[in-house]
Image (cartoon, grey):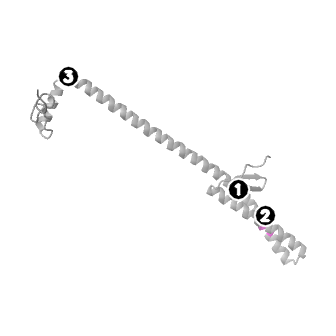
Amino acid sequence: MCRGIGCGMIPPLGDAMDFPDLTKLETWTDGAMLVLSVPQIIWPMILGTGLAICGFRGIVEKAKQDGLNGQIAGLNTQLAVRQERLTQAKEQEAILSAKLEKAEEEIAKLQKQFSEKASTQALFATANSTATLIGDIRAANTILQRTLAGVPGIVEVKGSDVKLSATKPSGG
């Protein structure tokens, strides 16, 4: 009874089961000639490899396309938001310009009253209305800056009044 190496279970070293030396060119050319000499193997292998490459390429291209479509959608959303901000800024700039014009008229009126030595009550009333206009201009300017910077909030425009709130605008 034989046990161990050489008894048919484990081939001994140097037996026919040795692996080929892959560093020799002859090993590679012999292997290539063996595969090329059997067309029943080579053509299905070439066809299968070609189909696998085409399929993999299609998957990669589809993934690229999907990624680019996602980026385009994101950029379109950003563009729409910026266009909306620009529209709001233009509306607010028109309101701000109108208020600035009124303030300049009030300042001219105040200067005229000073030169004509108007009553204290008239000067006080004009100074108060000018101060109110300057406060309105400051508020409108702040809202305009927030709109351009993209600070969240709801801008409510009613006539020449502009309000910024953190909630939805009141009905009306």
Dot 1 corresponds to which residue?
92
Residue 17 is situated, as x and y percent measured from the top left of the image, at: 13, 31
Numbered range of the magenta stretch:
101-106
Q: Is residue 84 above or below residue 116?
A: above
In the displayed structure, would residue 172 be above or below residue 105? above
Look at mark 2 in the image and give the residue it sits on. Answer: 102
Q: Which residue is mark 3?
A: 39
Quarter of the image for residue 56 reads: top left
Task: Verify CB contact (< 8 Å) between mark 2 and mark 1.
Answer: no
Q: Disc 3 marks which amino acid?
A: Pro
Q: Nearer the viewer, residue 52 or 80?
A: 52
Do labels 3 and 2 touch, CB within 8 Å?
A: no
Q: Identify the image quadrant of the N terminus.
A: top left
Mark with earlier residue (1, 3): 3
Residue depicted at 60% across the width and 51% down the height: 82
Instruction: Name the spot of residue 21 as percent of width and height, x first.
Output: 13, 38
Tell me if 149 is positioned left or right of 12 in this view: right
Query: For residue 156: magenta?
Result: no
Q: Is residue 105 magenta?
A: yes
